[in-house]
Image (cartoon, helix red, strand yellow):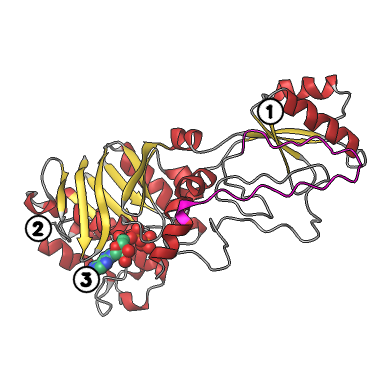
Amino acid sequence: MIEAVGLTKRYGAKTAVHNLSFRVRPGMVTGFLGPNGSGKSTTMRMILGLDAPTEGRVTIGGHPYRRLPNAPRQVGALLDAKAVHGGRSAYNHLLCLARLSGIPARRVDEVLGVVGLREVAKKRSKGFSLGMGQRLGIAAALLGDPQVLLFDEPVNGLDPEGILWIRNLMKKLASEGRTVFVSSHLMSEMALTADHLIVIGRGQLLADMSVKDFIAHNSADFARVRTPDDAPDQRDRLAAALTEAGGSVRPEPDGALRVSGLPLPRISDLAHGADVRLWELSPHSASLEEAYMRMTQGAVDYRSTEDTRAGLLAQPPAGYAGPPAGYAAPQAAGQTAGWPNPYAVPPQQTWQPPQPPVSAPVPSPAPAPADPMIERDSEDAR
Ligand SMILES: Nc1ncnc2c1ncn2[C@@H]1O[C@H](COP(=O)(O)OP(=O)(O)OP(=O)(O)O)[C@@H](O)[C@H]1O
């Protein structure tokens, strides 16, 4: 098990990791997630004794890495696949590592087989592709047959077959009772590989929970409901009935309604009661990516200047003429006027009954609530 307690790392004025406490348990794959610059690599380096914590501690099996007896046989890591002497063959690179750690030479051949590099074992690694380099780095991590494994972005540069291979390898290592700690930016991959997640943002812990709980806690399930395209009155009637029943209703780009707060059978009954025909009534369950985006959108350090605020505003599809008449565009947290932020927490009540065609002034949309991150980002501008 890996255990961090109050782990903090400062580089001069920069706090890379702040008061981080977590446990990485054996027998499962634990994903380590966070936006760029959030402190994942710094944390991994501290776990491996490559960086000393400014405060706090991190141990493996109860010992700091540097005090672990025969550490390379207990802990294997892939931090930077490029950290290889390019003039050496894959075989010689692994053989050097094995000799330094008192690992028998026959193990080199075994791990080359595991990572699928036997055929190129005698080739110099400087000619290796990114994916082959990753495989070589993974072979080095496996060399001592360790109980604890750390992988920093192991799927970097791998093709789909390689990604699948890594996924199965991680799962197999965990099923053998090992501790597997893996960072990645590929959410879809993490959703398939990890059992548990540790999520950090700006060096601080944001979440420590199972993948299932993480998605459940950070996403809102909703239903998509579509009425006949040629009958906008039916859509308006349905939206009004759903809102009256306590649902939250928002327009979708294609004219459908996004409804949260009401179960599907209730939506169906309300539609029936309002004499509205449905062309679609489908459940939507959030993905890990959506849940992650929602949780971390306030903790992103680097953001395109074209992402006006939260950086997550989807562009309206070509040809989209704006929301249907009768809708007051909701301004959820982290959202600017325009296209709805797909990751924003849905507002409680968004449906506005259609206005009668009188010459009353059209109410202007409410101003977006102040977003404290905007202030902070401009202060932190670098
Ligand atoms: N040696 C160093 N000196 C100064 N600052 C550093 C050093 N190493 C890391 N940092 C800073 O600490 C913060 C965390 O960096 P780190 O590389 O740990 O993040 P990360 O989550 O691994 O990022 P990425 O996903 O982009 O790899 C960043 O702001 C980085 O610039």
Q: Is 222 placed left or right of 309 in the picture?
A: right
Question: Dot 2: within a 10 Å radius of its alpha carbon, few (fewer than 14), some, or many (20 or more) residues?
Answer: few
Q: Is 315 placed left or right of 55 in the picture?
A: right
Q: Which mark is residue 247?
A: 1
Q: Residue at x 52, y 51 (%)?
A: 370
The answer to whether residue 91 is above or below residue 170 is: below
Magenta range is 347-373
Q: In x, y percent, where is residue 289?
A: 52, 47
Mark-to-mark CA distance, 2 and 1? 65 Å
Indicate the secondary structure of the residue bearing disc 2: loop
Residue 22 sits in quarter: top left
Residue annotated with mark 2: 102
Q: Residue at x 52, y 67 (%)?
A: 304
Q: Earlier in the sequence, mark 3 or mark 1?
A: 3
Question: Dot 1: within a 10 Å radius of its alpha carbon, few (fewer than 14), some, or many (20 or more) residues?
Answer: many
Is residue 77 at all visible to an observer of this figure? Answer: no
Residue type, label 1: Gly
Quadrant of the rendered image holding ligand 1: bottom left
Along the line of sight, which residue is nearer the eye, 287 or 134? 287
Residue type, label 2: Gly
Residue type, label 3: Asn
Quadrant for the N terminus in the image:
top left
Q: Are marks 3 and 1 in contact (CB under 8 Å)?
A: no
Instruction: Kindly tell me whether mark 1's CB lies below 8 Å from ligand 1.
Output: no
Mark-to-mark CA distance, 2 and 3? 15 Å
Mark-to-mark CA distance, 3 and 1? 65 Å
Q: Earlier in the sequence, mark 2 or mark 3?
A: 3
